[in-house]
Image (spheres, helix red, strand yellow):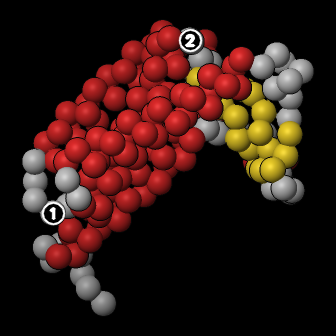
Amino acid sequence: MKRLSYWAIALTIAGVDQKIKNEIEKKSPTEASEFSLGRSVVIHRCHNKGMMLNIGESYRPIVAILSLVMTVVLAVVFLFTLGKKGSNLLKLGQALMLGGAFSNTYDRLKRKYVVDYISFNLPFKGLRNIVFNIADFAIMIGATLVAISSHQKSREEGDINQP
């Protein structure tokens, strides 16, 4: 895949997530109340003023600065990775993470909270109360791909004992 394609993935993730967030934010609280997609997925508006699960909501400026710093670091690492031959899985993972980081960091800086809107109707109440957005999924999937890529590279270099 070409370098520009990875940037397109990152920007598409951020753009789609921001578009959905903007649409959800336009609705009044009653319009934005829950509705289900089938039995398992629930769409509703949630403002996360901290990090994951609202951790650090009392320290919003620090959370925003940390988010910005980590996004910049990831962007720099991504730039260096794009210059390497191969490493397509690593590049894809970083592109997904960067797109998610762009969107959530933008929210923290502009809105002063992150708009979350997807939860799952699970049997465990604690898990039902966790609300995500597309940026969160992109970050999780991207981190998984980066870890898989790192594991594959270690195996190829003989750093991990092969069965």
- Kind of residue at badge 1: Gly
Task: Give the x, y percent position of residue 152.
Answer: 26, 71
| Disc 2 target residue | 112
Query: Viewed as shown, does residue 125 lie left or right of 104?
Result: right
Look at 78% across and 33% down and name the residue there: 44
Locate residue 162: give its quadrant.
bottom left
Task: Give the x, y percent position of residue 117.
Answer: 70, 34
Q: Residues within 10 Å of mark 1 (few under 14, many from 20)?
A: few
- The mark nearer the N terminus, 1 or 2, is 1
Task: Give the x, y percent position of residue 143.
Answer: 40, 51
Is residue 122 in sight in this rendering?
no
How much space separates mark 1 and mark 2, taking CA atoms? Answer: 38 Å
Q: Nearer the viewer, residue 32 or 163?
A: 32
Query: Viewed as shown, does residue 116 lie left or right of 97?
Result: right
Please tell me whether residue 26 is drawn above or below residue 156 in the rendered image. Answer: above
Look at 62% across and 27% down and name the residue there: 21
Q: Return the mark for residue 86.
A: 1
Locate residue 23: give its quadrant.
top right
Look at 50% across and 28% down and name the residue there: 104
Please tell me whether residue 88 is drawn above or below residue 78 in the rendered image. Answer: below
